[in-house]
Amino acid sequence: MRDIERFFREAVYYFPRLAGQHSQYVLKQLGSLQSDMRSVAVMHGVAQSLRLEQMRAVAAYVESLD
Ligand code: HEM
């Protein structure tokens, strides 16, 4: 199997599905990822520049997806 095919096949195990996830849950995870309480380098990068209001907006958007 080509590497790119393997990547897409296995991505589902590494990237959590967020669509429709409760906004309070997403907000809590973003807070942990921002503070390094939950240490995931790439997500720290995503979360670090967000202010609380922006995190709330992202969390509400994620919950609205299906
Ligand atoms: C709009 C951009 C993004 C948002 C709102 C977001 C949000 C989140 C949230 C809420 C979680 C925790 C989910 C859970 O534990 O149930 C998470 C985890 C994760 N995110 Fe992101 N993310 C974003 C972009 C990215 C990008 C660009 C990458 C990588 C290229 C990434 C990779 C990951 C990975 C690998 C995890 C799982 C971490 C672990 O294993 O503990 N995310 N993300």
Image: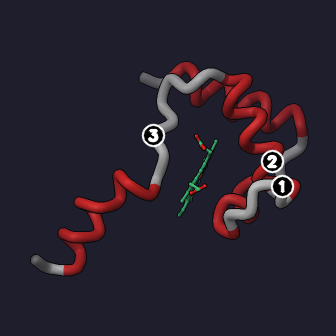
Q: What amino acid type should be assigned to the residue bearing mark 3?
A: Arg
Q: Which mark is residue 37?
A: 1
The reply to whether discs 3 and 1 touch (Cβ–Cβ < 8 Å) is: no
User: Where does the image place residue 46, in percent across and percent down from the top left?
Assistant: 70, 58
Q: Is residue 16 left or right of residue 53?
A: left
Instruction: Please determine whether, in this image, residue 36 is positioned above or below residue 26.
Output: below
Q: Amino acid at mark 1?
A: Met
- Please give the residue where the numbered disc 3 appears in the rendered image: 17
Q: Residues within 10 Å of mark 1 (few under 14, many from 20)?
A: few
Structural crowding at the residue carrying mark 3, measured as other residues with C-alpha within 10 Å and reported as few (<14), some (14–19) or many (≥20) = few
Question: Taking 54 as reference, is 36 above or below it?
Answer: below
Q: How far from the left and from the top, in percent, is residue 9?
A: 23, 60
Nearest to viewer (mark 3 / mark 1): 1
Asked if residue 65 lies left or right of residue 46, the reply is left
Q: Earlier in the sequence, mark 2 or mark 1?
A: 2
The local secondary structure at tag 2 comes to helix
* Label 3 vs 1, first from the N-terminus: 3
**Of marks 3 and 2, which one's residue comes earlier in the chain?**
3
Look at the numbered disc 1 and give the secondary structure of its residue.
Answer: loop
What residue do we see at 64% from left, 66% from top? Answer: 42
Q: How far apart are labels 2 and 1 at the CA level?
A: 5 Å
In percent of width and height, residue 61 lies at 61, 27
Q: Secondary structure at mark 3?
A: loop
Residue at x-position 23% and y-position 74%: 4
Q: Are marks 2 and 1 in contact (CB under 8 Å)?
A: yes
Drawn side of residue 23 relative to residue 51, left or right: left
Residue occupying image coordinates x 22% and y 80%: 3
Where's residue 18, x and y in %? 51, 36
Q: Which residue matches tag 2? A: 32
